[in-house]
Each structure stands twice: as structure tokens, then as C-alpha cells.
Amino acid sequence: MPVYSNPALAQSDTTEPAVRNISTADIFDALGRGVSDFWRHPSHYLFLALIYPAVGILLAAWSAGGATFPLLYPLATGFALVGPLAAIGLYELSRRREQGEDDSPRHALGILKHRAIGAIILLGLMLAVVFTLWLTAANAIYEAHFATNQPATLTALFSEVFTTSRGWSLLIWGNLVGLAFAFFVLATTAIAFPLLVDRGGSAGDAVAISIRAFAKNPVQMTIFGLGVAFVLFIASLPLFVGLAIALPMLGHATWHLYRKLVV
């Protein structure tokens, strides 16, 4: 396993970073740089180990019967909530490329020796809690709408959702609550993980700076978040295998967004 080799982190940078105002053009530039980083050393195989278990869970839920059908959509959309953690190794690859160091995909595992790994794990646990809360909330919303006469098949569930008033109510309330969870994750962790990779420090400080960046650039950050959500949705359509390309690109793009936001 490669050893993490950022000499700047012999001691964590404790200076208070400044947060910049950015433009919409900066958002698209960060996305473009993310694509460039990906094609320099395609790292999609790193994500196959994450995507296929996720697909396995979805297929298991599908085959288990009607009781688990309502979890399919929350599981699929909830994957984006843990995306910032899943891309942690990609931030290191983009950092290494920026510094002129070897940025081959094998160095992504070097993040495990990062001096801020404790803070990274703590933030990861926070995202796991958020993901669990989202599944709990989604199930509660479903039970509130379909406490009786629950659809017995996936086809029946789709029919109920799109052709009945309780189905449309489920769709609206479920997505509104999901959007609230997504905005929470976007505000608290959009640049928190890249910042820890770059500067070290505590999880609390990283979250606080991420919130400052969101508060200073709410429109631009929302555009970035919606763009990420759209790409993940499109990539999920072919049995989630498109995520193997989409997630690395978005991970690299997040690093460049961090660089534009934080001095």
C-alpha cells in the first residue's frame, strides 16, 4: 500500500482558510477539470467494488418481495448521500496531479495513512447516520401513505405512485424530504473531505468551512449539487454501471471546486 506522501501534512495546517466567491462558470470549469483528471488515469475500476455490492442490495430487495419494494428508490437515491466519502481517494489523486506527483490510481489507497484519517472516518460515520435516517424517513412516509392496501408487486407500486392521489403525495413528500437530506450533505460535506485531504484538521472545522462556502455561494453550490444529482441519476439508469464512470469524474470535479472555493 502506498504511503501517504503530502509533506505539507507533517503538521496539519491550522491557519483559517478564506472562502472565495465563485461564478457559475467556475462550476462548469471544475466539472471539466474533473473529466480531464478522470481520462488522464481512468479509475473507474476502483468504484466497481462499491457499485456492484450496491446493485446486489437493490436486487436482493427486489427479489425479497413486496415488503421491500418501497426501499428500492430510497436505496438508489441515497447512494448520492455517501458519495463524498466514496470519492475520498480521488481527491488525493487530483491533489497529487496538481503537485506534479505520481497520480496513478494505486495512490488512492494511500489516503488510509493520512494523518486526518480519524476526522475522515468521523465524517463518514456522519454520512452513514444521514443515510440511515433517510431510509427511515422514506419508509415512514411510505407507511403513512400506504398503511393499508399496499401494492403486492413492483408494477402495482409504480401504477399506484403515478395514477393515484396518494401515490403523487408520496412522490412529492418523499422527494421534498430527500431534497432536504441532500442539501444538508451538500452544505456540510461538499468540500469538507477535500479540505481534510489537503490541510488535515478536525471534522468540525472542515464542516464549518464547508457551510461557510455554501452560505457564501448558495446559487453556485446549488447548481453544482443539482448537476451532480442529474449525472448520478442518468448514470444509474443502466443498472448503475454508469456510476463507475460518473462517480470518479464527479469526485475529481469536487476537488477542483474545493480549490476554487478555498484559498
Image (cartoon, rainbow, N blue to C red):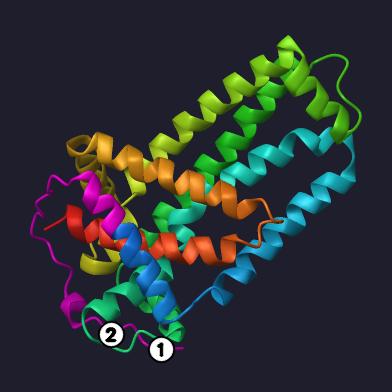
Instruction: Choose between 92 and 16: the one closer to the eye.
Output: 92
Mark 2–mark 1 contact, CB under 8 Å? yes
Q: Above or below — where is 247 with respect to 207?
A: below
Q: Is residue 114 visible?
A: no
Q: CA distance from mark 2 to mark 1?
A: 9 Å
Question: Left or right of 61: which side holds 6?
Answer: left
> Which image quadrant for residue 133?
top right
Magenta-drawn stretch contains 184: no
Residue 189 placed where, x, y %?
35, 48
Which disc, if any, is residue 5? 2
Q: Disc 1 designates what residue? A: 2
Tell me the amino acid under the disc marked 1. Pro
Q: Which residues are magenta?
A: 1-29
Q: Is 60 drawn above or below residue 131 in the view shown?
A: below
Q: Which quarter of the figure is the C terminus placed in?
A: bottom left
Q: Main secondary structure of the magenta part?
A: loop
Based on the picture, tell me whether residue 23 belongs to the magenta stretch. Answer: yes
Q: In the rendering, at what x and y percent does residue 234 appear?
A: 58, 50
| Secondary structure of residue under mark 1 | loop
Q: Secondary structure at mark 2?
A: loop
Residue at the (27%, 74%) spot, across then down: 95
Residue 140: image location, x then y, percent:
67, 23
Asked if residue 62 lies left or right of residue 228, the reply is: right
Give the residue at x 19% y 41%.
Answer: 212
Residue 238 in sight in this render? yes
Q: Count neighbours of disc 1 (C-alpha within 10 A) and say few if under 14, some if 14 to 19, many if 20 or more.
A: few
In the displayed structure, would residue 161 be above or below residue 17?
above
Where is residue 36 shown, x and y percent of the image?
36, 72
Amino acid type at image mark 2: Ser
